Amino acid sequence: MSKQPKRVFISIDMEGITGIVNWEQTGGQTREYEVGRKLMVGDLNAAIEGALEAGAEEIVVSDAHGGMRNIQPEDLHEAAVLVRGSPKPYSMMEGIDPDFDAAMFIGYHARMGAPRAILCHTYSGATVESIHINGLEVGETGLNAALAGHYGVPVVFISGDEAVAEEARGIIPNITAAVVKWAVGRQAARCLHPKKARELIKRKAAEALRNLDRVEPFRFEPPIEVRLKFLNPLMADVAELLPYVERLDGTTIKAVYKDYPEAYCGTRAAIYLAGTTVRRR
Ligand SMILES: [Zn+2]
């Protein structure tokens, strides 16, 4: 019998939520976004119920999409504490600490350029082409799992489309995935009914947490070398102003960090800076 998961951390993004296939559903002053938020909290509460069923006593949820104020506090399962708003020092992972027994990623999506992946992107769809850490290409799953891993916390469960499940399995052996949709293109998918998706998420999240000892924390060994390729050279022109950054070619910068938290924050700073050259997504 595995140890009981007393403290569980949840990072929740939006593009991998049940039924979401288009940016319209993920932000802005639209009716579509309001529907998207309902779907989002539905998947989230299912994961929380699964965690409670597995014995969790403390659950911290980090709202990890866009302005990070997607979850309406009143709609959230009352067992969880919500970290909301942005910027947060650890962004999608704000709230993580070494005392969590496990982490779960809900509504995650595959990295930029993945084939048949709903709304694929890596941190910023408007600026980032790819990110390699110590030679391994990663999306948000790997970037965020490595921060949990730095603190010794394993990511045991992920929900999203089939592409992000594949991506997660490729880097985190024995991770449990709940696949709620299968992309037929970047903005179209075959989707489970929300009720079925929530049942699946609840059941698999509980199962993953009951077996959390099967999953090792995912980490990179320091020093951490990050190669960040932007969509165009103007973005690299501004990111290059950061003193720790080296320009490799027209669109690629490189930096070497002493540990993973420094790499996580340094990389995000470069992406923020590059984003100043873009008017909109
Ligand atoms: Zn997102």
Image (spheres, rainbow, N blue to C red):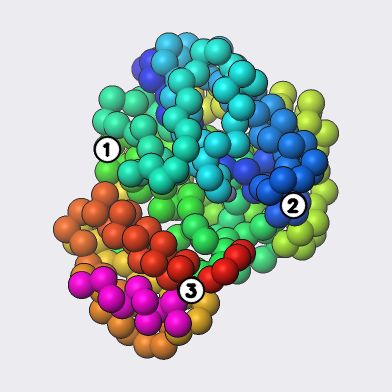
- 177 relative position to 180: left or right: left
- Marks 3 and 2: which is nearer the front? 3
Amino acid on which the number 2 mark rests in the picture = Glu
Q: Nearer the viewer, residue 66 or 229?
A: 66
Q: Which of marks 3 and 2 is nearer the N terminus?
A: 2
Instruction: Give, as a single range, the part of the protein colored magenta.
Output: 234-243
List the single residue furthest toward the bottom.
250
Q: Nearer the viewer, residue 113 or 35?
A: 35
Q: Could you tell me which residue is drawn at 64 percent across and 54 percent down?
A: 163
Label 3's element? loop
Q: Name the residue under label 1.
A: 151
Q: Mark 3 points at which residue?
A: 277
Q: How many marks?
A: 3
- Marks 3 and 1: which is nearer the front? 3
Amino acid on which the number 1 mark rests in the picture = Tyr
Amino acid on which the number 3 mark rests in the picture = Thr
Query: Decide: marks 3, 2 in contact (CB < 8 A)?
Result: no
* In the depicted structure, whether residue 280 falls above or below residue 56: below
| Image location of residue 6, percent across then percent down | 39, 15
- 265 relative position to 106: left or right: left
Residue 70: name its quadrant. Answer: top right
Q: Is residue 130 visible?
A: no
Q: Is residue 143 visible?
A: yes
| Image location of residue 198, percent across then percent down | 71, 27
Label 2's element? helix
Q: Name the residue under label 2.
A: 24
Query: Decide: marks 2, 1 in contact (CB < 8 A)?
Result: no
Prevailing secondary structure class for the magenta stretch in the rendered image: helix
| Image location of residue 185, percent across then percent down | 77, 62
Specify whether residue 238 is painted magenta: yes
